[in-house]
Amino acid sequence: MTPSDLAFDRHHIWHPYTSMTNPLPCYPVVAAQGTSLQLSDGRQLVDGMSSWWAAIHGYNHPRLNQAMQQQIGQMSHVMFGGITHPSAVALCRKLVEMTPAALECVFLADSGSVAVEVSMKMALQYWQARGEKRQQFLTLRNGYHGDTFAAMSVCDPQNSMHSLYQGYLPSHRFADAPQCRFDDNWLARDADSFEQLISTHKSSLAAVILEPIVQGAGGMRFYHPRYLQRVRELCDQHQVLLIADEIATGFGRTGKLFACEHAGITPDILCVGKALTGGTMTLSATLTTRQVAETISNGAAGCFMHGPTFMGNPLACAVASESLAILAENHWPAQVASIEQQLQSALLPLRDHPHVADARVLGAIGVIETHQPVKMADIQQFFVEQGVWIRPFGRLIYLMPPYVIEPSALKQLTDAIIAAVEQPVLFQAR
């Protein structure tokens, strides 16, 4: 990329969560291979982000490339209304096989946020079909479910973009975030706030929606599986649907294929995305039970009222099907376990560091929480100079590398974080 390209980018292209008047620097990536990103000046960066949880098999994977090349020679897209095609059938067959048995019906969508929108519309239309006016959702503080309007409405109401849109978004119920960490001793009172809210408002609740085990962009928090079990018990007791947002956690990231498996529970509606295509294309899916699907279908509308233009995109379905085929070969559990062990050895000792408030690891996720927020531009430049790509936010420096990462490359990432916490200049002053 030329200086002119970068100048145009700076003045005309709006990047995620970035100002147009004072944009953060952008680094020009011209190629990606395995676990490395190549900058236009030839430098190689070890990728610690998996392109926001998605590129679990690494970049430029030959099997994923081949699946796309084969599909594009047949058709890159065809409408899904009144039409089906082999790649959608193959993908949905795999999704039904690998998710809990009760989840039989698959709705394909464009992105994670849209999958959440679909799940919420399913819950609303389900109760409408049953003749009940249930229009609220119960969720957890510190949660994050996406950037579209319904998704924003169930994100944390204080510590997210939700707060910018108060007055425009519908009002929902927020239980206190669970405090028992994943490996803590379980304390039953951790679910008291949730239990009180679902008991009081059950007749108006369409569903509970939460991120199972890992609260991602809302704070990278890992909570106790017993909390999730208790949520499932209370949803059953009070006849409220349970939506599990596994867009970030699905497909092995936490050490289980789906995070719900840590608690041994099945949601009524499941959202998946991000790693679904191995990070190659945008695609998501919302799965639900036969009972929910048939109730909606037998309601006044006679169908589920949603249909994205690019729903069931053949190119995305073909590469997603191959990504799931790679997962089905079952190399990922050992890969994730190895990453977890190395992250624990490298990062958990930082709990005693004076600049660090906490360090935590689960599966192929490692998090350092600092006392002070990072200076984003400065710490991003520091990491690039260390030969790594790590994208912190707030007080969180975290890793979620591709599962195929070599130990030496993972060490380069953790060494860079260890070096960063020794640099007070990279953090905002107290």
Image (spheres, rainbow, N blue to C red):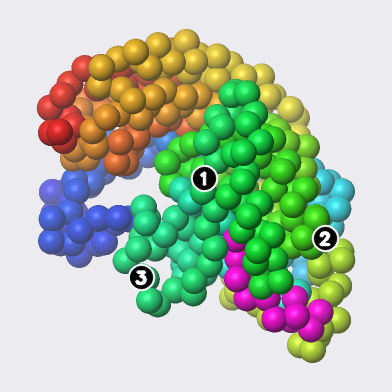
> Is 143 displayed left or right of 324 in the figure?
left
Q: Is mark 3 on a helix, strand or loop?
A: helix
Residue type at mark 1: give it: Ala
Residue ID at (72%, 43%): 230
Instruction: Give the Cα distance between marks 3 and 2.
Output: 33 Å
Spot occupied by residue 292 in the image (x, y as percentages of width and height): 81, 67
Residue type at mark 2: give it: Thr
Spot occupied by residue 411 in the image (x, y as percentages of width and height): 40, 14
- Are discs 2 and 1 less than 8 Å apart at CB? no
State the extent of the magenta-drawn residues as a range: 127-138
State which quarter of the image contains the C terminus.
Answer: top left
**N-terminal of the two: label 3 or label 2?**
3
> Is 179 displayed left or right of 102 in the figure?
left
| Mark 1 lies on residue | 177
Is label 3 or label 1 in front? 1
Name the foreground residue: 86 vs 281.
281
Q: Is mark 1 on a helix, strand or loop?
A: loop
Q: Which mark is residue 289?
A: 2
Q: What element carries label 2?
A: strand
- Are discs 3 and 1 less than 8 Å apart at CB? no
Residue type at mark 3: give it: Tyr
Instruction: Give the Cα distance between marks 3 and 1.
Output: 21 Å
Residue ID at (35%, 30%): 369
Spot occupied by residue 358 in the image (x, y as percentages of width and height): 39, 24
Residue 9 in which image quadrant = bottom left
Residue 266, above or below 286? above
Residue 250, above or below 183? below
**N-terminal of the two: label 2 or label 1?**
1
**Residue 69 highlighted magenta (yes or no):** no
| Mark 3 lies on residue | 165
- Are discs 3 and 2 less than 8 Å apart at CB? no
